[in-house]
Amino acid sequence: MRIWFNKTFSTIHAVFRNLRQSVPAGEITLICTHTHAHAAAFLAADESYLEPTELTGQEYLEWCVGFCRQHNIRLFWPGKEAAFISKHHEFFQAIGVQVLSVADVDTLTLLHNKADFYSELSAEVAQTMDFIAVNDRDAFDSAVAELSTRHQRLCVKPAVSVFGLGFRVLDTERDSITQILKGVEYQIPMQELRSGMVNTPEFATLLVMEHLGGPEWSVDCAGRHGELLCAVQRKKSQLAGGGQMIDNNVEIDGMVTRLTAHYRLNGLFNIQFKEGVHGVRLLEINPRPSGGFGMACLSGANLAHIALQGIKGEPFQPPTIRYGLRVTEINTPVVMQELL
């Protein structure tokens, strides 16, 4: 089977590695495309090609269909334009190509905006943190005043963000120079944030939220159209250098199962949780393999292979997961491959 992964995050190499470990040699061919000639994902692919940099939307969709036809693709696993492509499976089905979309276009769009996502989600499916979405300083002040009556510490994060970019804990005691000199990370002086809003009367949606100070879990999952096939919980140590532990939190397991069914999640995806004063809360659903995907598969569950079996409709034996295993990642120097 010829499987194509278009432009996506560099961590896709862990998916490639686990797919190769699980199938006989020659059974699959992994094709990777990217807009950068030195993309790290090229190192793990069987075939690598450059994508045009300027195409989006309909034009990119048409290019993808042409690429599938030209390179005899049988399974397309999209990263770039995943939401748009999920809306147009029929273009690929017409040429005999199966597309792996984590969810339908409406769900993928919803997951992209955490304000909409949290507002839509029923507490019966999963518990989210207490939050208020704001777009100006008056709304920010009102949100801080209201949430402060219920929570000791607050934080902010853009409604649309990846990799935790923009997340900050509101610091009501120290200024920025003190934070810099003391090496404080991921915090922002609240009064300085408010001052910055003076010059920006309206801004993109910002979430003001309760701060969850407990441990964090990253759950790597394989699913089949709402059926959870396998999930591996990684509980992150709160101590620097402490690694992560393969965990089996029953409450998290229940939320992952319900979320998978509720959004009919499919293929490989990641769900993150964090514990606060009032219990474990859902942070986000990432419709893609996580950066720690390779660590999850050290548990004994080859999630990439399980997802592929789900796509092909093959039965599989549930893996024995090594709970309590402590894992980490180390950097390995490599010479980069560059396409000309």
Image (tube, helix red, strand yellow):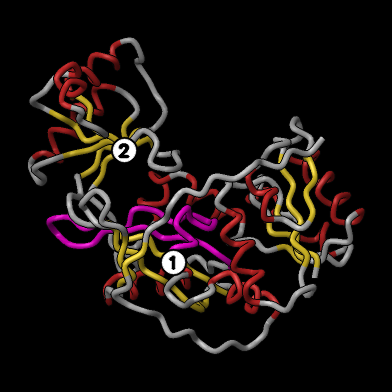
Residue situated furthest right in the rendering: 70
Secondary element type, mark 2: strand
Quarter holding the N terminus is bottom right
Q: Amino acid at mark 1?
A: Ala
| Main secondary structure along the magenta-highlighted residues | strand
Q: Which mark is residue 296?
A: 1
Give percent across and percent down for residue 268.
Answer: 55, 64
- The residues colored magenta run 267-296
Q: Position of residue 63 (x, y in %)?
A: 83, 44
Q: Total number of numbered labels?
A: 2
Instruction: Point out the tag, 1 or 2, that comes first from the N-terminus.
Output: 2
Vertical order, 195 against 129 (above or below): above
Residue 162 horizontal/vertical position (percent): 45, 42
Q: CA distance from mark 1 to mark 2?
A: 30 Å
> Which residue corresponds to the image point at 14% horizontal and 38% vertical from the top-left?
146
Horizontal side of residue 46 vs 162, given as left or right: right
Q: Identity of the amino acid at label 2?
A: Leu
Decide which of 322, 5 is in the foreground and name it.
322
For disc 2, the marked residue is 207
Quarter-wise, where is residue 317 in the image?
A: bottom right
Answer few, some or many: residues within 10 Å of disc 2's Cα (few below 14, many 20 plus, some between 14 and 19): many
Image spot of residue 48 (x, y percent): 78, 49
**Image quadrant for the C terminus?**
top right
